[in-house]
Image (cartoon, grey):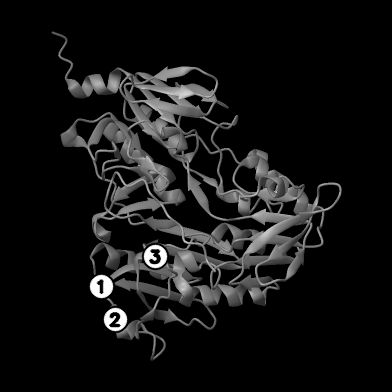
Amino acid sequence: MNGDGPLQRLRREGRIVVVGASLAGLRAAETLRDEGFAGSLTLIGDEPYEPYDRPPLSKQVLLGMADAERTALPRRLALDATWRLGAAATGLDMAARRVRLADGDEVPYDRLLIATGVRARPWPREAEAALDGVICLRNRGDGAALARRLAEGPRRVLVIGAGFTGSEIASACRERGVAVTVAERGAAPLVGALGGVVGAVAAELQRAHGVDLRCGVMVTALEGDASGRVRAAQLSDGSTVEADVVVVSLGAQRNTDWLAGSGLGAGPRGIACDAGCRAFDIRGIVTDDIFAAGDVARCPHPLFGYQFLSLEHWGNAVSQARIAAHNMISESTDRLPHLAVPAFWSSQFGVSIKSVGVPTLGTEIVVPQGALDGGGFVGVYGYQGRVVGAVAFDHARWLPFYEELIEKAAPFPPPFPTLDRRPDGQRPRDADFPDPSVPTHGPTVTLSGYSPADRRMTFTPAH
């Protein structure tokens, strides 16, 4: 007998395939090697580039502070791995344990990690989307193309959608002195992620920096000239916006199309998995050889009623990938849950915006620190009498305090009147989130119910 137990064999043998060669996929692969996995390791990516960082594409790259070609993610260690780049996964055979690729090849696995993330929602009319000057920002090439357009000094940029990405793009335009119009179907910027109370602050911030902000309207058509270059957009209120560049920022779609018919519990909301990142099949039975991590995963969280959460957060991709990788090569008694409190940040119009918890779960909000009408503030969200989230505009020092309250399921409103700088700061008000059935641009946390097999998603158009 060689004395090898199941754990030793898990770590030394077998074939692990990671589909998704971006942040979560890379950090998972590094963790596998760091924790002793010595078997075959393959990373599959649909883009021809090795893993790179995406947040700078709507920030530093557009300001000319960074080159889109130089956003590669740093490596924590050298990987002994096979890279299959530029060949997207097109199918999964769970019974045969094989991943099908666009080039016709098939890659066998013993354990599979799916970290395919999200892609930008495109402009729905193909002919209009193909006009020169219409850009949908998601990958490195998109970032480089938009940076070139801004450097050329267009007369006006139109940004469709005022979520975090759209707002960051508008901020970059103004910092470069470019005229910009933002069209948002919701009542305010960031309304889907932070609600109407905070969204009103974001709206004033944009207008104070010269953004032509149009809320409660939709772009109904894009128009081009005889040469095929975009020149104007028609809005639902009957107005016309002339623009040389149009940036489509309509939110994200989870990359699960390739899993259709596979038998995995995957759909528009993401891939359902347990707290240890093991994926469910469509019958609600957890698998033991398929895991998910990053933006594409939806996991139950005990702090938020065990609802499945889908998180589009940089930090979540890193922490969840490490948990998934650890559990892939661990026996059941050694596996860990992914229970991190969600956290997110953005920088726009000179303001640092950071959040913890799940603001979108909140129905009420209080402002214990600062003031909504200037100088920065902290907004704390409550749901059914407990603290579930917090957002800070230039007041990030308070977030660790509220993160601890979220972890303890502390009562709402927080019983700390001595911290309040304003007499009315502890008075709860409606957080004013829009109807979740109406799509808005930019929730970074999506609550998606309790069923691991739920593959439906219905949007009700705004009128």
| Percent of width and height locating residue 334 | 19, 36
Between disc 3 and disc 2, the foreground one is 3
Residue at x 30%, y 22% (from the top left corner):
95
| Percent of width and height locating residue 91 | 44, 27
Whether residue 175 is visible: no
Of the numbered discs 2 and 1, the one sitting upstream in the chain is: 1
Q: Which residue is mark 3?
A: 360
Residue at x 86%, y 49% (from the top left corner):
226
Image quarter where the N terminus lies is top left
Callout 3 secondary element: helix
In depth, the one of 196 and 9 nearer the eye is: 196
Q: Which residue is mark 1?
A: 384
In depth, the one of 223 and 183 nearer the eye is: 223
Q: Residues within 10 Å of mark 2 (few under 14, many from 20)?
A: few
C-beta proximity under 8 Å, tags 3 and 2: no
Q: CA distance from mark 1 to mark 3?
A: 13 Å
Q: Residues within 10 Å of mark 3 (few under 14, many from 20)?
A: many
Callout 2 secondary element: loop
Whether residue 416 is visible: yes
- Looking at the picture, does residue 428 appear above or below residue 163? below
Q: CA distance from mark 3 to mark 2?
A: 23 Å
- The image quarter containing residue 404 is bottom left
Callout 1 secondary element: loop
Looking at this view, name the residue that lies furthest to the bottom.
423
Image disc number at residue 416: 2
Image quarter where the C terminus lies is bottom right
Residue flagged by tag 3: what amino acid is it? Answer: Thr
